[in-house]
Image (cartoon, grey):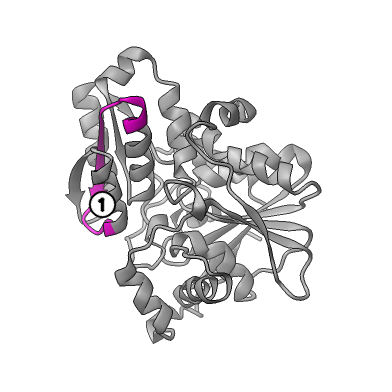
Amino acid sequence: MDIAGALRRIRPLAWETPVVPLDLPGAPPTHVKLESLQHTGSFKVRGAANRLLKLDARQRGRGVVAASSGNHGRAVAEVAARLGIPATVCVPDWVDPVKLRAIDAAAARVVRAGPGYDHAEERAAELAAMGEIALVHPFDDLDVIEGQGTVGLEVAARLPGVEEVIVPLSGGGLVAGIGLAVRERGVRVVAVSARRASVMAQSLERGRPVQLPEEETVASALSGGIGLGNRFSFALCGQVIDEHVVVAEADIRSAVRRAFRQCRLVVEGGGAVGLAALWSGRYRPRGRAAVIVTGGNIDRRLLVPVLHDSAHPRDHDSHRPDLIGR
């Protein structure tokens, strides 16, 4: 896998995002990489760009299809528009309106596939097979993983001597890519899941991909399964992850509020789980650390209530373990 080559390839389409210090009293020096300031609002543009740029002329002419809860779909739609590639994005019915508007604005065809993310994945696979068009998987694709790994290269370049990276975990494409990019440097990889979107964490704990019912979560970008036939991301995550942390809904909502009020950052729930792990005390860095804030695409109708609410009793799941496979 040529992650350095991917970084050169995607540079016209994906910015190098800022790395800034995070005040974390009593901890080793900690920084935040703000993929929330990426021009599509999330890191997903990296994998989408790498995948689409590798298509040949015939594939580009036929178009692409993707399944997404929002950020990947927006990335695919915007990259495809830049490259003149027809794009279809299959979304669950609960897709974030901000992300849906961005997909529409990029002139992609939107297909509402049903009540869950897995329905969107099934529909995208069907359309790809029917039309013989390229499927751009959000995480279980080596080109996408290679593109996401460019985050790790940028962290290593900006923070010489970094000892660990703290990364949100969903389908595993970002964690796998970053892990592959930094493991030869001896950097530990700490993966953070939302408790209500922890399919990959639980799959790794059980030693095989599993299916779980989708639960409502403020970290909706992390929702969905990993696929029982997962080809790449499950195995790679098993190789590169050193530790798992699971954060509760209350932790995530608090992190979104704190990022906004103290850091003047708009961060979506799925992008805030690394901060949630640190600020809740569920994880403390053991060495010089970088936490990846993966996205900032959050609808104001969700953001405003989160900024003003206190934790709802149902947000607390203290009977479940906070650490998996430590």
Q: What is the residue that sits farthest to the right in this orientation? A: 161
Image location (x, y in percent) of residue 320: 50, 74
Question: In terms of depth relative to the viewer, which is nearer, 191 or 159?
Answer: 159
Residue 115, above or below 131: below
Quarter-wise, where is residue 110 in the image?
Answer: top left
Magenta stretch: give its range.
Answer: 80-97
Question: In terms of depth relative to the viewer, which is nearer, 52 or 189?
Answer: 52
Q: Is residue 323 magenta?
A: no
At numbered mark 1, what does the secondary structure look like: helix, strand or loop? helix
Relative to 303, 320 lies left or right: right
Image location (x, y in percent) of residue 144: 47, 34
Residue at 48% x, 75% y is 257
Is residue 96 at all visible to an observer of this figure? no
Quarter-wise, where is residue 312 in the image?
Answer: bottom left
Q: Give the number of marks.
A: 1
Residue 283, above or below 112: below
Q: Callout 1, which amino acid?
A: Arg
Residue at 64% x, 75% y is 281
- Determine which residue is flagged by label 1: 101
Quadrant assignment for the C terminus: bottom right
Image location (x, y in percent) of residue 125: 27, 34
Residue at 51% x, 64% y is 272
Label 1 CA crowd tier, 10 Å (few <14, some 14–19, many 20+): few
Image location (x, y in percent) of residue 196: 41, 66
Question: In terms of depth relative to the viewer, which is nearer, 219 or 159?
Answer: 159
Quadrant assignment for the N terminus: top right
Residue 10, above or below 326: above
Residue 203, above or below 310: above
Is residue 137 at all visible to an observer of this figure? yes
